[in-house]
Amino acid sequence: MEDKITFIKDGIRLDGRRVDEARPIKVEVGVLARADGSCYLEMGNNKVIAAVYGPREVHPRHLQEVSRAIVRYRYNMASFSVEERRRPGPDRRSYELSKVSREALSPVILTSYFPRSVIDIFVEVLQADAGTRTAGINAASVALADAGIPMKSLISSCAAGKVDDQIVLDPMKEEDNFGQADMPIAMTPGGEITLLQMDGHMTVEESHRAMELAMKGCRDIYNMQRKVLIDRYSQMENATRQEEAVI
Amino acid sequence: MDRMDRKVAIPGDLLSEDKGRSGEGTYVKDDKVYSLLYGIANYRDKINVIPLAGKYVPATGDNVIGIVKDVTFSNWIVDINSPYDGLLHISEFPKRIEMDEMQNYLRIGSSVMARVKDVDSTMKVELTLNDRRLGTLKTGRIIEISHTRVPRLIGKGGSMISMLKKELNCNIFVGQNGRIWVNGNEKEMDLALKTILIIEKEAHTNGLTDRIVEFLRTETSARS
């Protein structure tokens, strides 16, 4: 008889992580010369790139708001981002993710500073491995800061899931597809939740535990986002230092 | 400036526990001061965060350089390197002209040095040319830098810009919107543009004015 496949053995998951361990994250800021702000981000095997344009003039004109800027967010998956080629273009899923991601970010953006304008955010998923919406929100938040847009804080986003009746942080594709539940959240470093979704089944206690675990994940991601923004500047400062030294 | 009173801030960073020190680019929540922007926090009496990027938002009294993008029956619509277009009414032209003559003075593509006369709450931007220092630009060159670097180009009390004008023997007009007009002989204009681009690149570093003086000395001596 074949053994029953398990997701977790001796507290170690299929990809070698512990249950409360997130995938490695890599963040780069200012990767696109022609966007006002941009960010490239990897969360495990997820690869996303975010570009921010604006504030700029609104087209089509009728969308414009007299007293504030509008925020547009486009989440798009590249056709080559998944194993089986995906039909290009927006679908029901990407419309929904665009909406919830926009609503996750817009509470911190000071739109009243730029009446009659638009802030455009484009997120392209280059490679997907569960948790692309959270990766997209993390990248978009750094790109917004890079564009010099006034915000109350950054937004960090992370998911928790349930596999083998255990709560795990940051599920990857196998755990997401065959697990019991998935709960992505987004929050400010102050702990205010701006996105909370869930599919699957969890008890009340489990959902509390999942929430706490995901919030811990968000705080770690926030530190990465913060570090990359701070380091970028000190790097520029050191570069000019070195130039001076050469002269 | 002392190094200790400047540091990089990101949106949401706690800058001070004293709400009285809230300056530009900051906000107050629960009597504490936080940063609104990604930029350099300057600690003086007030804490100001100077952004490293961002779009120019016109304010009344700013001098700007604009490029005419459309002519309507009584207004020139002027691109001022901002999300908002400037409106230059025919009556704000230094001399009285008839509506059908507008094209003879400023047409699409013409450049002007203008002042922002008024900005209302819906960001309707009114421009004026009614000043001896303002007017149309017919000679020279225009260069565009990020408007966040303009204060550095001008320097403390105008130190940087007056030094540039003297050393380069050029006429320079700096628009708050990040457009700069330079007029002089060809060689000097080349050097001026080069220098301005260096200032833009190194705007956030210390002791920049001294380094620029040094740079100009070596450039000019190499030539002669």
Image: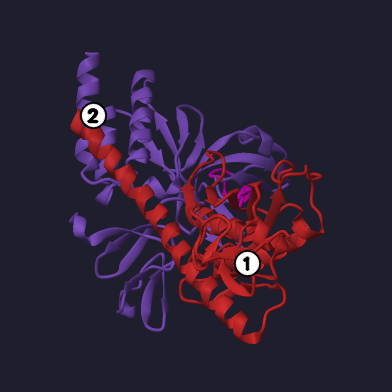
Residue to which mark 1 is pinned: A68
Residue sitting farthest toward the bottom? A204
Label 1 marks a residue whose chain is A
Using the image, tell me which numbered label, if any, was put on residue A111: none
Q: Which contiguous range is marked in magenta? A: B84-95
Disc 1 crowd, CA 10 A, few/some/many (<14, 14-19, 20+): some
Residue to which mark 2 is pinned: B215
Image quadrant where residue A208 sits: bottom right
Q: Which chain is purple?
A: B
Are circles 1 and 2 on residues that touch, CB within 8 Å? Answer: no
- Tag 1, which secondary structure? loop
Which colour represents chain A? red
The location of residue A147, given as percent across then percent down, is 51, 52
Q: How is the image coloured?
A: by chain
A18 and A208: which is toward the camera:
A18
A233 and B52: which is toward the camera:
A233
The Cα–Cα distance between marks 1 and 2, rounded to whole angstroms, is 45 Å
Badge 1 and badge 2 both on one subunit: no
Residue type at mark 2: give it. Phe
Asked whether A104 falls inside the magenta stretch, the response is no
